[in-house]
Amino acid sequence: MPKMKQHSGAKKRFKVTGKGKVKYKKPGQRHLLTGDSGNQNRKARKPAIVTKSDMKTMKKIMSYSF
């Protein structure tokens, strides 16, 4: 049987924490920041956790991280 392959884009963008949650960086911090409010920019700095409803997909595309 062939090896399962991880999603190469996902392994660059997501990280599994010690408790098995998936952490990622919020979008919107690269360019065109002048239109956003300060609150939006500050909230986008902190990493976020993937929701429970998306965890099934994450386990499939990041098969070797769990």
Image (cartoon, rainbow, N blue to C red):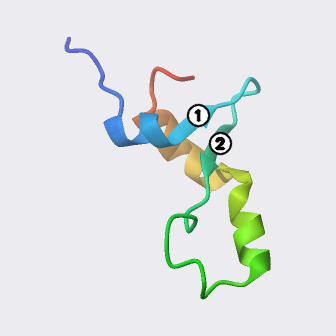
- What residue is at 49 percent from the left and 43 percent from the top? 13
Which kind of residue does numbered mark 2 sit on? Lys
> Quick one: which residue is furthest to the top in this view?
1
Q: Which mark is residue 44?
A: none
- In the rendered image, residue 7, in percent from the top left (x then y), is placed at 34, 36
Image quadrant holding the N terminus, namely top left
Residue 50, image x and y in percent?
Answer: 64, 50
Instruction: Give the answer, above or below, for where 61 lies relative to 54.
Output: above
SS state under label 2: strand
Residue drawn where x is 70% and y is 50% of the image? 47
Q: Residue furthest bottom?
A: 35
Label 1 or label 2, whichever comes before in sequence order: 1
Q: Position of residue 31 (x, y in %)?
A: 49, 71
The disc label shown at residue 15, or none: 1
Amino acid at dot 1: Lys
Q: Nearer the viewer, residue 32 or 49?
A: 32
* Residue of label 2: 23
**Where does residue 49 sit, x and y in percent of width and height?**
70, 48
Left or right of residue 21, residue 6 in this image: left
Q: Secondary structure at mark 1?
A: strand
The residue closer to the viewer here, 33 or 55, is: 33
